[in-house]
Amino acid sequence: MSGDEVSYTPGPLDRDAPFYVAGHRGLVGSAIMRRLEADGFSRVFGATSAELDLKDREAVFEQLGRTRPRYLVLAAAKVGGILANSTYPVDFLSENLRIQTNVLDAALANDVERVVFLGSSCIYPKLAPQPIREDALLTGHLEPTNDAYAIAKIAGILHVQAVRRQYGLPWISAMPTNLYGPNDNFSRTGSHVLPALIRRYDDAAASGAASVTNWGSGTPRREFLHSDDMADAVLHLLENYDGAAQVNVGTGTDATIREIAEKIAAITGFTGETAWDTTKPDGTPQKLLDVSLLTSTGWTSSIGLDEGLERTVAWYRDHRDELRE
């Protein structure tokens, strides 16, 4: 059976069916929980890492066997910025492969009807033509600073496609662009660029520092999507899309890291100088997703970057005393 032979017509999901969100406390998972509950889903659940180690295959099988979800979103992953990815590639490869394989195998064993696997735009080649189309996958070399993480996510996409071919289940994959919002990782060493900038500029504004130094040249272009928009897109895809191809999820617009830094500096009230340490890596020069497939299903983002940054800075300030260092 090929992925094109999956017999399924997308439509409204059963709001009373059990719905499992793997990674429900994280940036994306928590946004999906909020979105589902706001939309009337009455049996949405997950498990904290203390309650369930997704790297423990037996425990994952027991959890899904006991709860028997009809729908599942796999939003759990070990994630980090350039420093973490380039320093601990084994961890990012091994842990993500185990999480994905355990959850997807357990979902298959327990007849989960509809699964969404969430990947990352880093699956695409470093020098892919911009904006990046879904068919750019596996057409060139990956960005070396996060290739291990990317390979794990590519394996997840192929896992979903293999389930479609072999078992005919309407499982799908979505590839978000760079995400940000409440419950992001704002740690000093493990965060992605946007939360790292928010913490850096907010600290500098609070301390009255004269300058802030950022990694790289500031010239790479990046696309950012608020996590609440991502959650909305996930529900939309569940109810409106079925296909073997992974779906890019983004805004279709980008900005330079320098422009992002200037916006965050203004929002946090930092008035000092910004320096750029060009001895540090820039990563991919540009990473803008082609979102025409997503748009063709009837969805576009609704939270603008300025609004999203203001909301995220406000959330960070309300919660910074609780966040990891």
Image: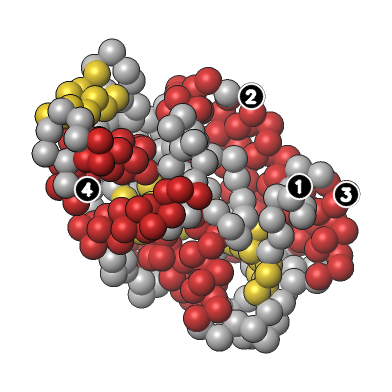
Q: Which mark is residue 138?
A: none
Using the numbered discs, state the Cα–Cα distance from disc 1 to disc 2 in whole angstroms: 18 Å
Other-residue count near label 1 (Cα within 10 Å), few / some / many at <14 / 14–19 / ≥20: some
Q: Determine the residue positioned at 56% across, 28% down.
A: 148
Amino acid type, callout 4: Thr
Q: Residue furthest front?
A: 207
Q: Cβ–Cβ below 8 Å for labels 3 and 4?
A: no
Q: Which mark is residue 53?
A: 1
Pick whichever of labels 1 and 4 is earlier in the sequence. 1
Image-based side of 119 in relation to 200, left or right? right
Of tags 4 and 2, which is closer to the observer? 4
Figure colour scheme: secondary structure
Closest to the observer, 84 or 164: 84
Q: Which residue is mark 4?
A: 268
Q: Which residue is mark 3?
A: 58
Q: Which residue is mark 2?
A: 90
Pick whichever of labels 3 and 4 is earlier in the sequence. 3
Question: What is the x, y in percent for residue 54?
Answer: 74, 48
Question: What is the x, y in percent for residue 191?
Answer: 44, 37
Using the numbered discs, state the Cα–Cα distance from disc 3 to disc 2 in whole angstroms: 22 Å
Of tags 1 and 2, which is closer to the observer? 1
Q: Determine the residue positioned at 65% across, 58% down.
A: 22
Image height of 67 relative to 199, above or below = below
- Would residue 15 be visible to someone looking at this image? yes
